[in-house]
């Protein structure tokens, strides 16, 4: 199933994408929570109920007539991992890590799959990172690698947008990874049965149609399951948590000369069996305070 959060004249709610339509779960399974976080917290019974609605196929709305939101607009946590593809480690001239390098993105940076990304007022070093992300489906702790697939609700695409000067000038990446709008995710959450092995997926990032990143998730240094084992060794994972698995080579800051994102640029990240997200760069709007 492809689970989406969408908005139309009747409000924001969740649905199941079927071809060029979306099955409105608020109409077809009104007993279910209308938001993705509530839905995931409701567990396997809610997932089964949604699957029945998908099989029945009634209540379809044209996908073109709705706005897709971030599948989970309000994740309880948003983590990402740095230096997790060998080719990206080489281009940054870093030493291959012996231990996964996790960092937090602030949850307020979550952005919709086709909404604009802000070019910050305080930096010109705006960069993209196309990544596979996954979402935790149930509360869990001390999950062994061999059972980690059981706690994944689904997979999505992440652009781990990065402000390189802010990222590099402190020992932790938090500030450079957390500007508002710098976490586009989506376009929907694809359940594991539709993905199969998540470590066989082609990934491409294009800027204005020019291919900048092209890799496959088989090149992950620490794979999705190892990441779950490590994280859950330390703390309780919560339903709705988004974890982004790292980016391959080809980021703008590593090109010679560096090619950072400018106003008007369009970044598209595409992952096999999921789809694509696409975001345009705009100047950071709004008053100073
Ligand atoms: Zn990243």
Image (spheres, rainbow, N blue to C red):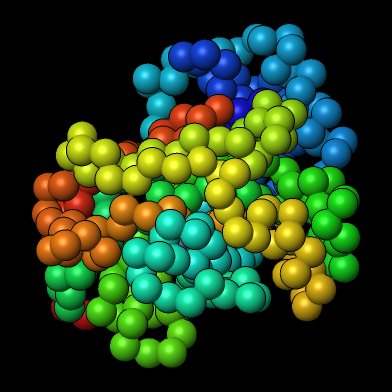
Q: Position of residue 3 (x, y in %)?
A: 61, 33
- Is residue 12 visible to the viewer in this orientation of the structure? no
Residue displayed at 71% across by 30% down: 196
Q: Position of residue 236 (x, y in %)?
A: 79, 70
Left or right: residue 277 compared with residue 145: left
- Nearer to us in this view, 158 or 75: 158
Picture quadrant of residue 269: top left
Q: Position of residue 228 (x, y in %)?
A: 74, 61
Picture quadrant of residue 99: bottom right
Left or right: residue 118 compared with residue 242: left
Ligand 1 shown in quarter: bottom left
Residue displayed at 86% across by 61% down: 143
Left or right: residue 32 compared with residue 73: right
Instruction: Please say if 30 is above or below 39.
Output: above
Residue displayed at 18% across by 75% down: 123
Instruction: Please say if 271 is above or below 40.
Output: above
Residue displayed at 55% across by 66% down: 81
Q: How many discs appear?
A: 0
Left or right: residue 29 compared with residue 63: right
Instruction: Please say if 147 is above or below 288.
Output: above
- Is residue 47 visible to the viewer in this orientation of the structure? yes
- Nearer to us in this view, 211 or 14: 211
- Nearer to us in this view, 244 or 11: 244
- Nearer to us in this view, 89 or 162: 89
Q: Position of residue 219 (x, y in %)?
A: 56, 49
The quadrant in which the N terminus is found is top right
The quadrant in which the C terminus is found is bottom left
């Amino acid at each position: 199933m492809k689970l989406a959060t969408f908005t139309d004249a009747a409000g924001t709610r969740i649905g199941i994408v079927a071809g060029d339509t979306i099955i409105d779960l608020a109409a077809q399974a009104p007993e279910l929570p209308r938001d993705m976080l509530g839905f995931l917290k409701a567990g396997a019974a809610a997932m089964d109920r949604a699957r029945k609605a998908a099989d029945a196929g009634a209540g379809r709305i044209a996908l073109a007539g709705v706005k897709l939101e971030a599948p989970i607009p309000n994740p309880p946590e948003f983590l990402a991992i740095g230096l997790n593809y060998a080719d990206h480690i080489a281009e940054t001239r870093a030493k291959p890590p012996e231990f996964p390098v996790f960092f937090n993105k602030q949850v307020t940076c979550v952005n919709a799959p086709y909404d604009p990304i802000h070019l910050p007022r305080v930096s010109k070093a705006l960069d993209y990172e196309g990544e596979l992300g996954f979402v935790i489906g149930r509360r869990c702790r001390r999950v062994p690698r061999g059972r980690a697939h059981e706690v994944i609700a689904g997979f999505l695409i992440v652009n781990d947008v990065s402000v390189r000067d802010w990222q590099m000038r402190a020992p932790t990446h938090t500030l450079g990874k957390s500007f508002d709008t710098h976490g586009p995710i989506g376009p929907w959450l694809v359940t594991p049965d539709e993905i199969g092995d998540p470590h066989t997926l082609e990934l491409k990032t294009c800027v204005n149609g020019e291919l900048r990143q092209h890799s496959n998730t088989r090149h992950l240094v620490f794979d999705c399951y190892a990441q779950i084992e490590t994280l859950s060794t330390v703390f309780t994972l919560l339903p709705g948590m988004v974890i982004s698995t790292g980016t391959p080579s080809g980021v703008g800051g590593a090109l010679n000369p560096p090619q950072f994102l400018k106003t008007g640029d369009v970044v598209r990240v595409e992952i096999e069996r999921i789809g694509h997200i696409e975001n345009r760069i705009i100047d950071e709007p709004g008053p100073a305070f």
